[in-house]
Image (cartoon, rainbow, N blue to C red):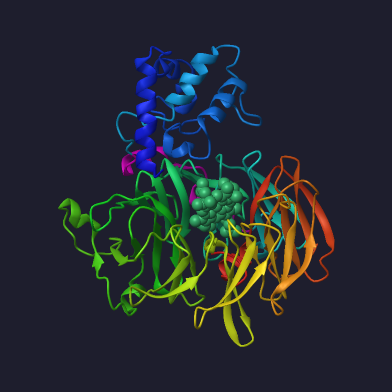
Amino acid sequence: MRWPERLAALALAAAAAVAQGTPDAAALYQTHCASCHGADRLGGMGPALVPENLGRLSPEKAARVIAEGRAATQMPAFGDRLGADEIEALARWIFAPPPAPPAWDAARIEATRRVLVPPERLAKAPRHGADPLNLFVVVELGDHHISILDGDRLEVIARLPTPRAVHGGPKFSPDGRFVYVASRDGWIIKVDLWGLERVAEVRAGINTRNLAVSDDGRYVMVGNYLPHTLVVLDAADLRPLRVIPVVGRDGTSSRVSAVYVAPPRGSFIAALKDVREIWEIPYSSRAEALPVYEGPMHDYRADSGEAPPLAEGAFPVRRIPVGTFLDDFLFDPEYRFLIGASRQSRTARVVHLAVGREIARIDLPGLPHLASGITWRWRGRRVMATPNLREGVVTVVDLQDWKVVRRISTLGPGFFLRSHEKSRYAWVDVFFGKDRDVVQVIDKERLEVAATLRPAPGKTAAHVEFDRHGRYALVSVWDMDGAVVVYDARTLQEVKRLPMRKPSGKYNVWNKITRSEGTSH
Ligand code: DHE
């Protein structure tokens, strides 16, 4: 069921419950929940409790959380204060949409912004002895922290709190000094990797997907599911500069699946969930020098009757029509092509960005996870490879003729694929199924699995990232009692194990700012 119908069904269920004289959930919410989750349900100390933010929970699981609380969070147990019928009513009620759609405009965003370290108090030099370009930022989902890891000594040099449920890759400023982190609840934090401190924070949305940073370091763009907006922030202090409503040419409002930066084009590129369009949003005058054969720039403010001069900072939108909904992307290294996965079809679509049109299709059944794809040179040609969220396969595709070169079978569907220019191996996890505790190492020349490693039997192993020099491959053991396990990238022997609380992604400064072909961008 698509989300508008799902919301309608949930609203009907909630209305029926009220009609049957079940407990007054709205009143219970104000008494017991509003102080942490916000009177308007948009979150506070606790997460937002609106249906769009609860997609990863069922009403049954929500009832269990209300009754028993949630470990390692501030959510207490209400089982001794509320009856089973009251808990059930509350759990059902939060899955019904609020009476008015929540607004999150520039004024509300600005009201949440805090600059914690003003520019004059920023560190004048790194406050650590590590190579600032070989640091890793490790997201620990278990207790909402990031650990900053020295990539040479393999030691944690700082640990900083984050908002709950950080998702998508944190993104670095072009010089690698600052990192921007987004949470599913819309919070964006900026961390200084010299001073090892949080320097600013803002809530840019209610349900956020991810963020991207312009390659001139001036802007952060945030893509939201709720409301349907793209938000441009000033990268210096996270001040909101522009809130762009996302509405397709036919008037359909759309969630943003993800936003990326295309440095050679001087633009942001957004994947949209509910309209058959890709949006390109230039942030630099460099974009004007690029050939664009179709898809004229469109000033979204013209829709609302506002004056449309395309001045500096106007962030015009170029709509690229596509034949299907494309909500997961990979770019070729030159950013000439965008390869997008459609959840509705067996084929991925190749869009020529300058032409603004689909130019090829790739036979990619299942659910390829292109955001996690990588590329390398193979027998004189550039190939890309992607894991698959539905099938145990890594598919290798020739980027010249878009033909599948090899389908490499793995022990189950995988989430993340990683390599490094200096490594002959690509590492893929097996995130789903009985073998989710293994990572498989693929020989990039022979295009076959060369080794299968099991860092912690019985515990999910996922997400690999290399250090700057390609010496080490770091794997997360995705458990409250987890670890980052460091392997020698050549011998595949374990080198070290760093205990962590449910570590998920890890991000090496150098690999990210140089846009290494072996990692995501
Ligand atoms: Fe992610 C990145 C989408 C579920 C952990 N995930 C991304 C990106 C997209 C995406 C589009 C790339 C953006 C970026 O890096 O800025 N993820 C989705 C989904 O649509 C999906 C399947 C469902 C959802 O509810 O969002 C999904 N993702 C998950 C998880 O369940 C994971 C495993 C745990 C979590 O944190 O929720 C997860 N996603 C990640 C991670 C990255 C990511 C760790 C960054 C990878 C990287 O190395 O760049």
Q: Is residue 257 magenta?
A: no
Foreground pick, 13 / 322: 13
Image quadrant assignment for residue 508: bottom right
Foreground pick, 204 / 255: 255
Is residue 192 at all visible to an observer of this figure?
Answer: no
Foreground pick, 98 / 141: 98
Is residue 334 at all visible to an observer of this figure?
Answer: yes
Q: Residue at x 63, y 43 (%)?
A: 141
Image quadrant assignment for residue 162: top right
Report the side of 505 relative to 483 (left or right): left
Image quadrant assignment for residue 144: top right
Q: Position of residue 513 (x, y in %)?
A: 56, 67
Q: Position of residue 48 (x, y in %)?
A: 46, 33
Quarter that holds the C terminus: bottom right
Range shown magenta: 104-125
Q: Residue furthest bottom?
A: 380
Report the side of 281 relative to 479 (left or right): left
Quarter that holds the N terminus: top left
Foreground pick, 157 / 124: 157
Report the side of 384 relative to 135 (left or right): left
Q: Is residue 124 magenta?
A: yes
Q: Position of residue 208 (x, y in %)?
A: 45, 46
Q: Residue at x 56, y 30 (%)?
A: 61
Q: Position of residue 100 (x, y in %)?
A: 29, 31
Report the number of numbered marks: 0
